[in-house]
Amino acid sequence: MAKKVLKELTVNRDWCKGCEICVSFCPKKVLELDSRDKAVVVSPEDCICCKLCELRCPDLAIEVLTDQDNDNE
């Protein structure tokens, strides 16, 4: 299977409650909490597309899109 390449990593700041679960699960430290305690993407180039942030976010505020996401459609 080919390595996934990140197309887009978005955080819906209106939905994010700042629980920091995504920050804790990210193995590459791509996400941080900002001064308003909302998740922000600080280093998208380091993302390995594991989608742990998306899967663990209790508020469904994170979306990770890869080059392979539309292959099955």
Image (cartoon, rainbow, N blue to C red):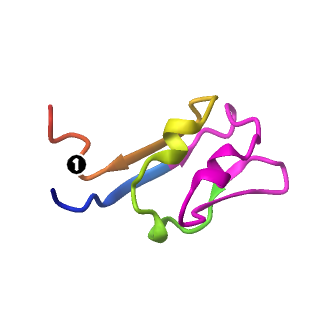
Q: Residue at x 73, y 47 (%)?
A: 20
x and y percent of residue 48 in the render? 40, 62
Picture quarter containing residue 57?
A: top right
x and y percent of residue 59 in the render? 63, 29
Picture quarter containing residue 49?
A: bottom left
Seen in the picture, residue 57 relative to 30 is either above or below; the reply is above
* Left or right: 59, with 34 as reference point: left
x and y percent of residue 43 in the render? 55, 68
Assign a secondary structure to mark 1: loop
- Point out the image quarter for the N terminus: bottom left
* Left or right: 14, with 2 as reference point: right
Front residue (pair 33, 8): 33
- Point out the image quarter for the C terminus: top left
x and y percent of residue 40 in the render? 65, 54
Q: Residue at x 56, y 37 (%)?
A: 56
- Image mark count: 1
Q: Which residues are magenta?
A: 10-39
Front residue (pair 56, 32): 56
Q: Is residue 34 magenta?
A: yes
* Left or right: 71, with 24 as reference point: left
How busy is the neighbourhood of tag 1: few (under 14 within 10 Å), some, or many (20 plus)?
A: few
Front residue (pair 24, 11): 24
* Left or right: 19, with 53 as reference point: right
User: Where does label 1 land, which residue?
Assistant: 68
Amino acid bearing label 1: Gln
Seen in the picture, residue 59 relative to 48 is either above or below; the reply is above
